Amino acid sequence: MNTLALNIFELIDRLEGSRSLEHSEFVRLLSDDISPDEALYLQHRARFITDRIFGRNVRIRGLIEITNVCRNDCLYCGLRKSNSSLRRYTLTVGEILSCCRLGYEAGFRTFVLQGGENPGLTADRIVETVSAIHKEFADCAITLSLGEWSDNDLELFREAGAARYLLRHETINSAHYSRLHPSEMSRDNRLRCLWTLKRLGYQTGTGIMVGSPFQTVSNIAEDLLFMKELQPEMIGIGPFIPHSATPFAGYNAGNLDLTLRLISILRLMFPGANIPATTALHTLHPQGRDRGLLAGANVVMPNLSPTGIRKQYSLYDNKKSFGAESAEGLAKLASQLEKINLFITTERGDYKNV
Ligand code: SAH
Ligand code: SF4
């Protein structure tokens, strides 16, 4: 074993023990010169911790894509307002409740309402939707992923019954942030939302796209240090995948191995966090979902949206779904996961502080 290799094994052990590293040490762990043995060791440590906390259980969340209308123009996203090739839609409260009913029957106990920042979808309407779901499905968790709102609105959603909120910070580096977003959007407003979510007692999720244009390994190390500060309860990590109708159409997708390595690093940093094997990972590689789970993820988010609108919710090209919207679909997912000795659990699956 050469000294370089020894250092990386040591770094992994130290990360597991202290749950953090210095910026330069994270850069080292994320660099290209990590050997296959070292990468495998990292993955095994992360899965070992995942098994210790969650057993071989995989938590499921039903994703409902409630609107593809967005007032923002994030340069990476197919839902950006400048993309005129989409048929825009907004589900009614009744349609959302129907999705929840189907999901509940199949065994889902968490519903994730995700969508663009739709000016027509007012805070009142979100409150109405959340209250209706909370009333009918009192034993279920409601997660929102609806972008940036005022502190007051986030508080109203919480009071209406939303327990969790996903809002990726995308990049903590201001210069990088401004290359991914138009000038009207600010990193600081996103951070304001994230700290408010924490203060309001939401189980708060953040995260990044791996391989977004102009991202450096040093940026990712900064992101890890920011997450250490925020202490999120959920972390969404997926590869960037280009969308043909965006300014980033010609950029490469993010790297599979680096995404998996980050999932493992995050599991060691946040042992009890809910970390999904994301749809983007599943889209990037046919074994992406399974490899994400084996690298330390503990959640999958099958799509409960009405099938007719799914194509219109195109964050990136060729977006896949886990196809587990029905009870039969879920049984199929379960049998696929059994092959890697993992088992779906229908528990609500709140954050565990360990
Ligand atoms: N409007 C909300 C939720 C919808 S977008 C929001 O922005 O938070 C949900 C996530 O999709 C974003 O956080 C982003 O990280 C991811 N996403 C968007 N475009 C993507 C792309 N081209 N490749 C991979 N992920 C993308
Ligand atoms: Fe809108 Fe979210 Fe896409 Fe940005 S990432 S354009 S906020 S849907």
Image: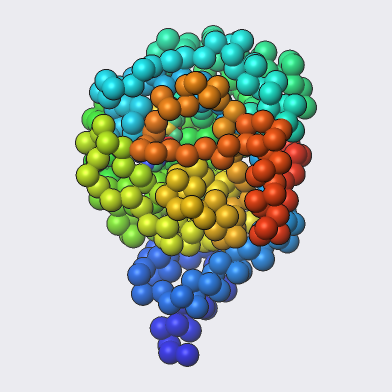
Residue depicted at 65% across the width and 51% down the height: 336
Position of 160 compared to 121: left or right?
A: right
Residue 294 % position (x, y) = 60, 60
Q: Is residue 158 visible?
A: yes
The image position of residue 162, as x and y in percent, is 63, 25
For the C terminus, the quadrant is bottom right
Q: Nearer the viewer, residue 131 or 64?
A: 64
Residue at point 60% right, 64% down?
46
Identified at 22% across, 44% down, the residue is: 250
| Ligand 2 location (quadrant) | top left
**Vertical order, 146 against 352 (above or below):** above
Q: Residue at x 55, y 22 (%)?
A: 306
Q: Give whichever of 115, 187 is nearer the camera.
A: 115
Q: Is residue 302 left or right of residue 8?
A: right
Give x and y (percent) for residue 111: 63, 29
Say whether residue 336 is left or right of residue 286.
right
Residue toward you, 145 or 102: 102
Colouring used for the render: rainbow
Q: Is residue 127 above or below residue 291?
A: above
Instruction: In the rendered view, tell whether residue 342 sits above or below residue 98.
Output: below
Q: Is residue 79 above or below residue 213?
A: above
- Of the pair 94 and 129, the residue shown nearer to us: 94
Across and down, in percent, residue 190 comes to: 41, 33
Q: Residue furthest bottom?
A: 1
Q: Is residue 53 visible?
A: no
Find residue 52 and report its image quarter: bottom right
Which corner quadrant of the image does residue 2 belong to? bottom left
